Structure formats: structure tokens, C-alpha cells
Image (spheres, grey):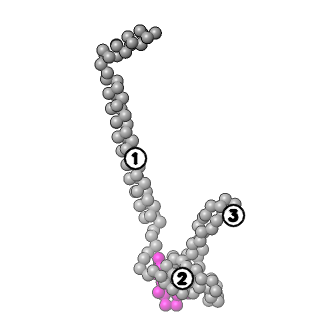
Amino acid sequence: MRVKKGIVTSHKMDKTAIVTVHAYINHPKYKKKYRSSKKFYVHDPENKLQKGNFVKIMETKPLSKLKRWKLVKIYQTDTEVPVLDDVVASVDEVAQEGKKEKVAEQEKSKKEKSASDKSKDNKNPESEAKEKENLSSEK
């Protein structure tokens, strides 16, 4: 009998839940890992499962047209699956904060650079004249 672990994605049916199992597969040609997911209809006789539960399921004889798995164990009961939009939003916020810090650092370095360039440009006119005389006398 095959055993799989997954997350409950739906429990709207009576005595049935849908469990999504994710697997990471290597591409045969490009050797890159990618995630594939598959949904299984699971027999839940007591209707204990809630959306977001992490469960262990086991293959069994066909119980209905689509249902061929039964519930073995519930690992987590009170945690919900994080909504993808919330995760993406939090990642975007962190990225924007990082960009703001980089922009601030770049502006600071530009100001320092321009300040050092200005100090070089603001030499005494007398010292510039002496430098020109030295260059012309060397020729």
C-alpha cells in the first residue's frame, strides 16, 4: 500500500476531503527541479479534516468513482495554509525596503563623491598658475 503526505485543500464534501500532494521532480534533460502537485480524494468518515491540515493518507480499495485513499493520521490541526497573495505581498515589501536602502546608499556615495570633486576643483588660482608655469618650463 502506498502512503503519501499532503495538505488538505478542500473539505466541502460529506466524508470526503481533497488532499494536495507536492513532489519535486528533476527534469530529465535540463536537470532542473520543478514542483508538481496532484490532488487525491480521501475518505474522512468523521469529517475531522479542516482546510490546511497536514495529513498522511494511504491507498485503499476504490470507495467511489474518484475516492481511493483513506486518512491515516493528522499531523497539524490548527494551522491554515498561507494564502499565496499574502506571502507574495510580504516578499514584495521586503524587496522594496531593500531597494530603498540601496538607493539611500547610492545617494550618499554620490554626495560624498561630488563633495570630494568640488574640493579638488576649488584650488587657489595662484597654485593653478604656478602649476601651469612649471609645466611650460619643463617643456
Query: Of the residues under marks 1 and 3, which one precedes in the sequence?
Result: 3
Q: Main secondary structure of the magenta part?
A: loop
SS of the residue at dot 3?
A: loop
To which residue does mark 3 refer?
28
Q: Quadrant of residue 125?
A: top left
Amino acid type, residue under disc 2 in the picture:
Lys
Q: Quadrant of residue 122?
A: top left
Q: CA distance from mark 1 to mark 2?
A: 45 Å
Q: CA distance from mark 2 to mark 3?
A: 29 Å
Q: Nearer the viewer, residue 21 or 28?
A: 28
Residue 16: x and y in percent read: 54, 85
Whether pointer 1 and pointer 3 mark residues with C-beta atoms closer than 8 Å, the reply is no
Number of residues whose C-alpha sits closer than 10 Å to that of mark 3, classed few (under 14), some (14–19) or many (20 or more): few
Residue 51: x and y in percent read: 47, 78
Report the residue at 59% width, 71% height from top. 23
Query: Of the residues under marks 2 and 3, which one precedes in the sequence?
Result: 3
Total marks placed: 3
Tag on residue 102? Answer: 1
- Picture layout, residue 75 above or below residue 91: below
SS of the residue at dot 1?
A: helix
